[in-house]
Image (tube, rainbow, N blue to C red):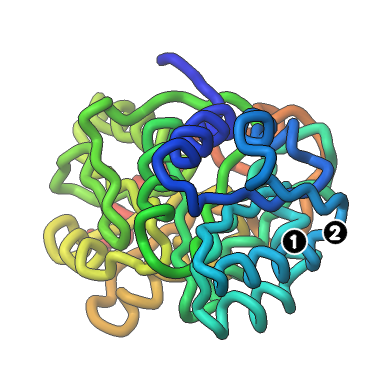
């Protein structure tokens, strides 16, 4: 399976959006090479604002640009955007419902050897707490491009979460991202695996392994975490009777929590969550960390068998 980096595709589509719409502007800091916004800055220097290592100021400037009719994209590492500028995002962007697009890179533990201070494992919970924000976690470069375009063309604030390394391309060129809608990537009747981000590839591999064992798993790509496709989760519970969620984020406040909340209220169903446990992670290569913290296809496969066992008990 081919691989490509989401942040590379983001940099490419950002330039295209700049060509298509003169209101698209960029706000960033001293990480512009890493977030791949440099090409935009070279082509549109008058629409490129480098504010240095000052995330709070970046958000305030972006809010001002949005209030003036511009479409500002703001990019830095996920941990800096959400950790250093929470108050500015909350008061300056979320409460005013301004048209700011925060596209972060280097999210999750696959940031790898940069260590725990650079690993954002709480960011989905933080951003989903804002009532006005759209929160999207793309599965690959194809969905990254479509999600960024959707953000540019949809009024309101967005948070789009990208990772650092090249990741598997799991979606076909014909794929169509829809904000607030899950996408069925594989049909199945025995249980449903709901995944987002880099865990979508792992979910598909797990489903393939389960099929060899005679278990047919439905796979849903839940890239849109806010708005959340509750109807797809409830339908999956009704039609398959067991749910596994898979995400590269803390179990608290992420995809699994959103699915469990919907099911607890409207359709109690056995749920197994494949996610990071409470606590912070070690430094290591992305592959080493995914194994250590049980975010592999084998871990999803094991969770699926536990969920089916609970369904039958």
Image vertical order of residue 226 relative to residue 8, above or below = below
Tell me the number on the disc at residue 58.
1
Image vertical order of residue 171 relative to residue 102, above or below = above
The residue at the point 20 percent across, 59 percent down is 236
Under tag 2, what secondary structure?
A: loop
Outermost residue toward the top in this view: 2
x, y (%) of residue 121?
67, 55
Under tag 1, what secondary structure?
A: helix
Tell me the number on the disc at residue 150.
none
Could you tell me how many numbered marks the image carries? 2
x, y (%) of residue 92?
65, 79
Of the pair 267 and 155, the residue shown nearer to us:
155
Side of 57 relative to 132 (left or right):
right
Q: Are marks 2 and 1 in contact (CB under 8 Å)?
A: yes
Of the pair 198 and 132, the residue shown nearer to us:
132
Of the pair 313 and 262, the residue shown nearer to us:
262
Q: Quadrant of the C terminus?
A: bottom left
Q: Can residue 123 be spotted in the picture?
A: yes
Image vertical order of residue 174 relative to residue 47, above or below = above
The residue at the point 36 percent across, 61 percent down is 154
Q: Quadrant of the N terminus?
A: top left
x, y (%) of residue 153?
36, 55
x, y (%) of residue 89?
66, 73
User: Marks 2 and 1, how far apart in space?
Assistant: 6 Å
- Which residue, given by chain and number where applicable, does mark 2 sit on? 54
* Residue 64 position by quadrant: bottom right
- The residue carrying pointer 2 sits among few (fewer than 14), some (14 to 19) or many (20 or more) residues within 10 Å by Cα, namely some
């Amino acid at each position: 399976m081919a691989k490509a980096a989401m942040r590379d595709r983001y940099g490419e589509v950002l330039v295209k959006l700049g060509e298509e719409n003169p209101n698209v502007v960029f706000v960033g800091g001293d990480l512009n090479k890493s977030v791949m916004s440099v090409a935009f800055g070279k082509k549109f220097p008058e629409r490129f604002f480098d504010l240095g290592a000052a995330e709070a100021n970046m958000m305030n400037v972006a809010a001002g640009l949005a209030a003036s009719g511009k479409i500002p994209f703001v990019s830095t590492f996920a941990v800096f955007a959400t950790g250093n500028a929470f108050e500015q995002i909350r008061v300056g962007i979320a409460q005013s419902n301004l048209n700011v697009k925060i596209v972060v890179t280097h999210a999750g533990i696959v940031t790898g050897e940069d260590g725990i201070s650079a690993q954002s494992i709480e960011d989905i919970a933080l951003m989903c707490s804002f009532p006005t924000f759209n929160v999207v976690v793309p599965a690959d470069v194809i969905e990254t491009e479509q999600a960024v375009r959707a953000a540019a063309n949809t009024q309101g604030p967005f948070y789009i979460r990208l990772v650092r390394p090249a990741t598997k391309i799991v979606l076909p060129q014909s794929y169509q991202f829809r904000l607030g809608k899950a996408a069925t990537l594989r049909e199945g009747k025995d249980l449903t695996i709901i995944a987002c981000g880099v865990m979508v590839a792992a979910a598909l591999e797990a489903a393939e392994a389960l099929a060899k064992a005679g278990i047919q798993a439905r796979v849903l790509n839940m890239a849109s975490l806010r708005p959340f496709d509750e109807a797809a989760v409830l339908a999956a519970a009704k039609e398959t009777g067991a749910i596994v969620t898979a995400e590269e984020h803390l179990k608290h406040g992420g995809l699994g929590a959103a699915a469990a909340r919907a099911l607890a209220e409207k359709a109690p169903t056995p749920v197994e969550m494949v996610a990071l446990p409470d606590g912070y992670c070690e430094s290591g290569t992305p592959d080493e960390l995914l194994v250590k913290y049980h975010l592999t296809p084998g871990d999803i496969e094991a969770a699926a068998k536990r969920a089916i066992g609970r369904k039958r008990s």
